[in-house]
Amino acid sequence: MTRILIVDDDEGLIHFLSRFFSKQGYDVAACTDASSGLDILAEEQFDLILLDYKMPGLSGLDTLKEIRRLQVRTPVIVMTAYGTTETAIKAMKLGAYDYLLKPFDRAELKRIVADALEVNRLMKEVVSFPCELIKVSPAESKGIVKIIGNHRKMQEVYKLIGQIAGKDVTVLITGESGTGKELAAGAIYHHSHRRDKPFLTVNCAAIPDTLFESELFGYERGAFTGAEHTHIGKFERCDKGTIFFDEIGDMSLSTQAKVLRVLQEGELERLGGTETIKVDVRTIAATNKNLEKAVEEGKFREDLYWRLKIISIQLPPLKERVEDIPALLDYFVGRFSEEYHKSIRYVADGAIQKLKSHTWPGNVRELKNCIKRAVLLSSGDVILDEHIKLEAESHGPLETVNREQLTSKLKDKLDDLVPYILQVSNQKAHANIIELVEELLISGALEQCGNNQVKAAKMLGISRNTLRHRIKKYNL
Ligand SMILES: Nc1ncnc2c1ncn2[C@@H]1O[C@H](COP(=O)(O)OP(=O)(O)OP(=O)(O)O)[C@@H](O)[C@H]1O
Ligand SMILES: [Mg+2]
């Protein structure tokens, strides 16, 4: 269970926060002064700490320093009274994950906490890989995610990770969807000397430009309407840490220019700010797009491309390493048997053959989902051929898209986007997200059908009238 510690001398606030988080299913502990907080932290592990900055006794800064010493990987959110942004900035520099200004907004509270818990998960999840070349410490079994596969191409990947993880170079990870790019990024981080510093993932897909830049670079108070206080961006928050740009191929050209400057000079300015801020961040980027082609088409900066490409790691598609399927099968069967309290002991030969002859357009993610389903469908302790459900292949490109794979991808993406949508939606989150999805779907269908409305309407399963209506609404 996720554990949160609240340290605040305001008992009313503790009461409110405890209820708020307990209702969401978190396990909450609280205390009203810094020294008992530190006593608890010396004994117990938490996933998140909420710390009041101004309490009698130890100063907020000293408490924070001590907390970081005791539990360096646990994110700390500092709570300060309105109008004390300066202290908040100092706290961020000392390694606080974020800050909340009192009195706080529930939506803001929820968003920041969810964000911090995700970072906590990523930082604590140790990624290891089977390679004799690199010494992997025998970590405790919980929270370990393994990269499975001994194919020559995977050995190359491990070797490269081992060679570059400890150096401070920028790394570009390429490969089809579901081949394990995020996993590889995690492995680099965990084998680097920055592993005790933050790891932040930034998904570059489909986030509006201005919002994206303000998240990344931060902004000064008054930089734009609604900027009521100074906001520290992800780069600054990640100082001394590692930033992972997922789907970097989708980053806009203007953001690319600013990111390049950070990579080259280690400098940035907050939006609306004049002060140049120094940051020391290691960058890892991933994409499933062909960046070279994007450069040719003018959609990706050539200088940034070359900078990223210095060290690139290419993850092979699963169909090029079918020999690894039995090992992956073993691993996932083990994981899901445990998760769903099953005791699968045997996988029928026919089932293994079926898995080996599939082409896996969704790569390891698709295989993982397929095995998960098989584990759930199996009765007793055997997985048979009939439990392996593969989507029909070779019926044209659309049908080869596995529904399960699509759902999990969409969910991944929406999980990233939802906090932003909630942040900017002004109580219209539901309508905003539904409209966003609808618009993308309709423009996609029109594109595939060469703008033929009859065909597009049929593909979407809506009437032509409805389609016309939507085209007008979204100005397509
Ligand atoms: N070699 C591997 N061993 C074990 N699990 C793997 C491996 N490769 C991928 N996975 C699992 O498959 C899923 C997809 O992997 P990941 O998210 O890293 O892919 P990705 O390349 O980032 O995909 P996308 O481009 O769609 O974002 C994850 O659950 C991951 O843990
Ligand atoms: Mg990914």
Image (cartoon, rainbow, N blue to C red):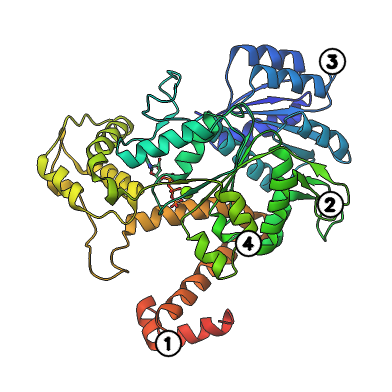
**Image depth: mark 1 or mark 2 in front:** 1
Disc with the residue nearer the chain's start (1 vs 2): 2
Q: Which mark is residue 57?
A: 3
Which residue type does callout 4 highlight? Arg
Which element is circle 2 on?
loop
- Asked if disc 1 is less than 8 Å from ligand 1, the answer is no
Residue at 85% in and 46% down = 276
The image quadrant where one finds ligand 1 is top left
Number of disc labels: 4
Q: Please give the label number shown on residue 453.
A: 1
Q: Earlier in the sequence, mark 3 or mark 2?
A: 3
Q: Position of residue 65 (x, y in %)?
A: 75, 21
Indicate the position of residue 468 as horizontal and vertical percent values: 49, 87
Going by the image, does 96 lie left or right of 122? right
Q: Which residue is mark 2?
A: 228
Q: Are marks 1 and 3 in contact (CB under 8 Å)?
A: no
| Front-most of residues 19 and 441 | 441
- What residue is drawn where x is 52% and y is 30%? 190
The earlier-in-sequence mark between 1 and 3 is 3
The image quadrant of residue 95 is top right
How far is mark 2 from mark 4, CA to CA?
A: 33 Å
Mark 4 touching mark 3, by CB under 8 A? no
Name the residue type under label 2. Glu
Asked if the residues shown at circle 3 and circle 2 are in contact, with their CB atoms under 8 angstroms apart, the answer is no
Q: Which residue is mark 4?
A: 301
- Residue at x-position 20% and y-position 32%: 344
**Element at label 1:** helix
177 displayed left or right of 222: left
Foreground of the two, 126 or 420: 126
